[in-house]
Image (cartoon, rainbow, N blue to C red):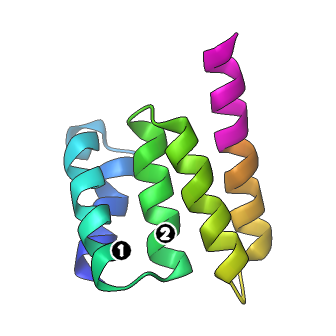
Amino acid sequence: MALNNLAWILATAQDTTLLDYPRALSLAKRAVEIKRSPTFLDTLAEAYYVNGFYEEALQTIQEALENASENKKYLARQMRKFEKGLRLREE
């Protein structure tokens, strides 16, 4: 849980001095290796996204959504955000 929470902060903090996208990705990957939960997968997807790995973000959020029993609306919004990022990059 601590790895996941720190990864989320490093990927999404409002305070830009806390942002560290590469470290967020590394920590999120480690968290998912320990526990492949929808919450941890969401963090990993966000870390992929902020690092510009849109395809990986989409694949990961799809897995989170498929395995989620709650927060499906939130995960679907995340998927749309990642799809939009991918489309913008391709334009």
- Residue at the spot x=55%, y=78% of the render? 38
- Residue 73 position in % (x across, y down): 80, 69
- Quadrant of residue 86 in the image? top right
Amino acid type for the residue under numbered disc 1: Val
Q: Is residue 13 visible?
A: no
Relative to 11, does residue 72 appear above or below in the rendering? below
Say whether residue 88 is magenta. yes
Span shown in magenta: 82-91
Say left or right for 8 vs 87: left
Q: Are marks 1 and 2 in contact (CB under 8 Å)?
A: yes
Residue hosting label 1: 32
Query: Residue 41 has which mark?
Result: 2
Relative to 38, does residue 81 appear above or below in the rendering? above
Amino acid type for the residue under numbered disc 2: Leu
Say left or right for 91 vs 58: right
* Quarter of the image that includes the C terminus: top right
- Residue 79 position in % (x across, y down): 70, 52
- Residue at the spot x=37%, y=61% of the render? 8
- Quadrant of residue 74 in the image? bottom right
Say whether residue 1 is magenta. no
- Residue at the spot x=49%, y=41% of the render? 49
